[in-house]
Amino acid sequence: MAANIAVSVGEPNRTLRSIREPAGAMLVALVFAALVTSHFDFIPFWDAKAYLYCVEEAVQKPFDILNFRCGGHPSIAYALLLSLGQYVSPWNPPLLYATNAVLGIASIAAFHGLLRRLFPGRPAIEYALVTALYALAPLFVAHAIFLNVDYGATAFFVLFLYFLFAARFWLAAAFAVALIFSKETGGAAWAVTMTAYGVAFVPATRMARDQRIAALRAHAPLVTAPIVLVGYLVLFHVLRGDPRGWMNSYAPVGLIHDRLDALLNTNLADGSIRSFLVDIFILNFQWLYTGVIVCALLAAEVGERFEVDGDSLWLTVRPWAARDPLLSPLARADGGRVALS
């Protein structure tokens, strides 16, 4: 007991950090939940109405897993999740929003955990702020209410990434399947992630045979996702078939009449392409992320180094900043060290 007291007294910063880090994530999750619950009276329209009808029609019919493909997307896992409350109380949109809120909170917790694994030892306020950038991104919050399969794919992708980096491969495999069967872009994200994981984390040095077998056995659950995908393609082809080919049973590629033209039509001289890019930049709030990145780059340019002192983050201003009339007050403060948090 005395040893435990000594440890607690001798490491106050560590104790405070262990309390602050989850508290920051909980606060962000509570704000997210409050935003979602405040819009439970939202009436679906446009795409949200189409996805509502897809889920409700699948619930009303005799159970068929393929009925949960919405708009030609492989949305089986996400639509099934949304349907759980509708089996109890059909045509009840707030239950759909509540399901999205729970999924979003799980994703926020996973994002916070992922940050702590990838960037250990950072101040708790940093983890909370970066988590808030994800959790409170306007599109993420909006699509918890405005039903869209991209929301499910985003949440499942973060959960998949967390469990992959945590080496909990069965859970990573489960969320990989959910990701692949939310939207076809989720399948592409899974493929890119697994390729990058293999390149970055497979040891380049030769391993002993026993070690290699043990590593392969540990990663074996990750094979579940491609097996399920192939099984789905075979099942769909046998039960329903599609004259437009195997790929159309997973993604609505049949809607694209000229695939080569769709791939090559990225000419910036085309006014429609420029308009599309401007729409993405403004309506998808890319300007917000751009501003954050620009500020980070400016801070990196002005600052010579970042350092953590206790629970505070300090920036040491570069010597040339002393000659700048706007930055010279920073350079003179505490020997050029400025407290950021």
Image (cartoon, rainbow, N blue to C red):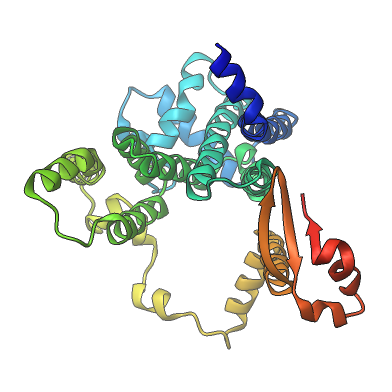
User: Splitting the image into 4 quarters, where does residue 121 fall?
Assistant: top right
- The residue furthest left is 209
Residue 92 visible in rendering: no
Nearer the observer, 341 or 89: 341
Q: Is residue 111 left or right of residue 203?
A: right
* Residue 318: x %, y % from top left: 75, 74
* Residue 190: x %, y % from top left: 35, 52
Nearer the observer, 250 or 337: 337
Q: Residue at x 46, y 18 (%)?
A: 87
Q: Is residue 208 left or right of residue 36?
A: left
User: Splitting the image into 4 quarters, where does residue 228 fall?
Assistant: top left
160 vs 81: above or below: below
Residue 87 visible in rendering: yes
Q: Residue at x 35, y 60 (%)?
A: 253
Q: Is residue 335 left or right of residue 83?
A: right
Q: Residue at x 40, y 50 (%)?
A: 186
Q: Quadrant of the N terminus?
A: top right
